[in-house]
Image (spheres, coloured by chain):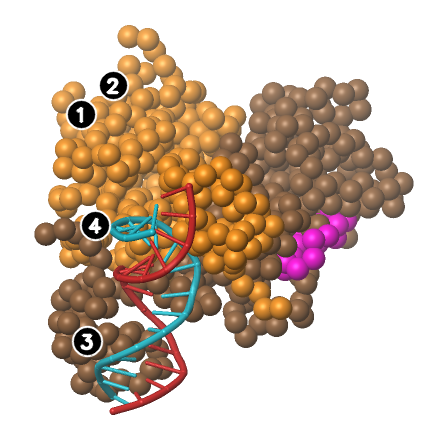
Chain colours: A brown, B orange, C cyan, D red
Amino acid sequence: MTKTFVSADDVAKRAGVSRSAVSRTFTPGASVSDETRQRVMEAAETLGYHVNQLARGLMRSETGIVCLVVSEMDTPYRSKLVRALTHELQKAGKISMLLNADRSDGSVDAALRQTLHYRADASILLSGLPDKAITKLCLDSGQRIVLINRDDDIDGPLRINIDDKQAARVAVSAFLRAGCRRLALANSDVGTPSLMARERGFVAAAADYGLDVMVVRHGNTIYESGRHIAQSLFARLDPPDAVFCVNDLMAFGLMDGARHDCGLRIPEDVCVIGFDNIEQSAWASYELTTFSQPVDAIVENSVAWLRPGNDSESIRTIELHAPIVWRKSIARKVS
Amino acid sequence: MTKTFVSADDVAKRAGVSRSAVSRTFTPGASVSDETRQRVMEAAETLGYHVNQLARGLMRSETGIVCLVVSEMDTPYRSKLVRALTHELQKAGKISMLLNADRSDGSVDAALRQTLHYRADASILLSGLPDKAITKLCLDSGQRIVLINRDDDIDGPLRINIDDKQAARVAVSAFLRAGCRRLALANSDVGTPSLMARERGFVAAAADYGLDVMVVRHGNTIYESGRHIAQSLFARLDPPDAVFCVNDLMAFGLMDGARHDCGLRIPEDVCVIGFDNIEQSAWASYELTTFSQPVDAIVENSVAWLRPGNDSESIRTIELHAPIVWRKSIARKVS
DNA sequence: TTGTACGCGTTATCAA
DNA sequence: TTGATAACGCGTACAA
């Protein structure tokens, strides 16, 4: 007895009907008599039949496959997004293929090639930026592409962005209201569009108040970089009394650096604001004031875009608001 | 101009060869003349051809698809494992389908049904426990199944477990060497096999030294539960001076509860040991002594099991060692 | 409502 | 080495 998958033919033979009857039974809206349906279902059950979606995808134009292209997917914000996306996609009857786009696994381009190999209906990119030629290839093949948090000028994909500039502006005024005057910004030197937008927005908003910003960039967008930046920032002759970190991980590192390495108190000596509002922000050791990524809205808009009824020409860019979440890393003074 | 995927036929026409020649060009080890190969490659490049893995999977017995069944995948340990798995699977030429098995998305059984729909070569379960009937169905269909950290008596799948009992024993002796005598154990009431094994192992090892253990179970295996347990534990007349938490997240909650809610110092007043060794364990606010999940070994063994040359009958259970990682949440005294 | 026959894009087999 | 042809498992137009 060799182990194989059960086919519609097997079920048909067992139920004593034609193979089309089996097909129709599992095709919503097809016309089958109740009796036939019942006999087919019974045979399918005992044999353990499952429709082969791969073969089905060969006939239909849709495969039901959506590719998620992600790098560093064990990062809290990323994994949160991946979880929410798979959840919503499953609800919509789609299935997620997860493509690791970490540098060691080849580029984002290689990942996008895989989406073509498996005839994905769509690709959602949470990381990296694809080559324009590859993007065009995917679009020409009828795929839909969603770019999350990677503002760029490629035409064709749906772009979902956060209003980083506005958030940065809110951060500046929050610091000012808390009585801070020596502002700093902690960034990585990865140069992701959204991170750079936060930096530029912060510097610009501060300039509106006639303030300079100490900008420090270091390493990847992770905890260790934040801690490293704290050491260099608080060793200065004119240390900052407020630091805006481009994401929460860096903020945690900065806070730990300030407290444990430099003996500073938060928010008494330094105020800190982060970005993302990941789980850890609410932990008692941090109580970080931060901007909340509108994960649900991001996911909702992404999945809506994939639905067939959608007019792919109508919308191109969606900009979502990231509201501030007040906690204790900044002295809040009501204006 | 309607958007469609490019087929082998298109390439064949363009290159002026037969479809078989195209197929052979993209089949490693097939015999094609250099000239033909070159012409095919050229045509494929300009047309943007990609082999349809779905159709290929129809012919071959392998689809190259491996399903990852995960719940709460934004948990640090889970996401770390998922990242490592996809990385290694991609290196092995496989592709990962991610199935969300959170309760709201239907059970693990529903997820496993999906793996059948897409003719996955294998399924790797990081969460939940499948019904035996479904497991049998998958195995009968020729699928391979890997169960990670879910010790049970189902026959057929490869089981990869951690030696929780031994780790718990190490935890007890570590506490004793640090001078602790009032031991406690913090668990969730989820009842996952591995978590229960840690609890039982800890209690048994303590009993060997004639010590009782205060066992507290609460909620899910998350931060908030740890913090909640801290409050109830340290309000006792005989509060513990050592707490073993079944995972790091609970340990962080417990530490924060002890420090911020109860005014205790770690490790002076209480020693804490966790399990998993996730990123946050090394953060300055925690410096948690914990057991390191052998993620690389887990992944390596899982992927090796999927390789065709593997004798599926030979190995059934692999037990891996989780070494302790010393940090500052326990006063370490060299014996 | 049912069954027959064809096509989807690929690989395997066979004869040339 | 090459090309024609038969599968693979399915949906669907067509005729019954």
Q: Amino acid at mark 1?
A: Ala
Between circles 1 and 4, the one closer to the viewer is: 4
Amino acid type, mark 3 = Val
Q: Could you tell which of marks 4 and 2 lies nearer the N-terminus?
A: 4
| Residue denoted by label 4 | B142
Residue at 43%, 20% (x, y): give it. Answer: B328
The answer to whether mark 1 and mark 2 are in CB contact below 8 A is yes
Q: In which quarter of the view is residue B182 placed?
A: top left
Give the crowd class for mark 3: few <14, some 14-19, many >=20 residues within 10 Å. many
What is the C-alpha distance between the residues marked 1 and 4? 42 Å
Tell me if I can see residue A128 in this picture.
yes
Residue indicated by mark 3: A40
Q: Chain of mark 1?
A: B
- Residue B41 x %, y %: 53, 44
Residue D3, picture quadrant: bottom left
The 10 Å Cα crowd at callout 1, few under 14, some 14 to 19, many 20 or more, is many
- Same chain for the residues under marks 1 and 4 in the image: yes
Depth check: B37 or B109 in front?
B37
Report the chain holding disc 2: B
Alpha-carbon span between mark 1 and mark 3 = 56 Å
Q: Are marks 1 and 3 on the same chain?
A: no
Along the viewing direction, whichever of B105 and B274 lies nearer the viewer: B105
